[in-house]
């Protein structure tokens, strides 16, 4: 199902991208020199579709970095809470081990040798063998 949904999104997106690239094949010059507009020292000539795709990719990358840096405090809090939980689990395991060691069977007194509750061992009140 996941592959189907991926194909359902990727194939039309790829067709739109190819159509956009074919429709915008003419070259443009991008100048990064604000002082010399006639003869820029820093310029590049490339197809318009490539320029727009690169600018979109750069925008996605910049947005992803901004979100990642913006969520820094949440990641830090998650790490701190995970460390606290790990410590609490270890402490709980230690306490359970201590309780298990402290919980011993009550001491039972041994039965008197040769005599049971109602007389000789192995017989009831009527002296029947058990």
Image: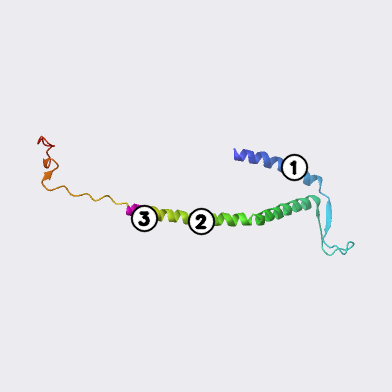
Q: For this view, does 31 lie left or right of residue 77?
A: right
Badge 1 or badge 3: first in the primary sequence: 1
* Tag nearer the camera, 2 or 1: 2
Q: Which mark is residue 98?
A: 3
Q: Which residue is mark 1?
A: 16
**In-front residue for pair 105/125:** 125
Q: Tell me the residue at 69%/55% (across/down).
A: 66
Question: In this view, which residue lies farthest toward the right?
Answer: 38
**Image: magenta residue range:** 98-102
Q: Which quadrant does the C terminus fall into?
A: top left
Rounded to the nearest angstrom, the CA distance separating label 2 from label 1 is 49 Å
Q: Residue at x 83, y 50 (%)?
A: 26
Quadrant where the N terminus sits is top right
Side of 73 where 87 appears, left or right: left
| Front residue (pair 69, 43) | 69
Q: Distance of mark 3 from mark 2, alpha carbons?
A: 21 Å
Q: Which corner quadrant of the image does residue 36 belong to?
A: bottom right
Residue at 34% x, 52% y: name it.
100
């Amino acid at each position: 199902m996941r592959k189907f949904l991926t194909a359902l999104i990727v194939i039309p997106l790829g067709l739109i991208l190819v159509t956009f690239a074919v429709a915008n094949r003419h070259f443009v010059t991008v100048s990064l020199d604000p002082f010399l507009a006639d003869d820029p020292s820093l310029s590049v000539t490339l197809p318009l579709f490539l320029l727009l795709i690169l600018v979109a990719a750069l925008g996605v990358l910049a947005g992803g970095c901004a979100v990642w840096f913006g969520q820094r405090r949440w990641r830090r809090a998650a790490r701190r809470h995970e460390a606290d939980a790990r410590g609490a689990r270890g402490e709980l395991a230690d306490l359970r081990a201590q309780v298990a060691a402290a919980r011993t069977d009550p001491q039972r007194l041994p039965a008197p040798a040769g005599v049971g509750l109602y007389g000789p061992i192995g017989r009831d009140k009527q002296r029947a063998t058990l």
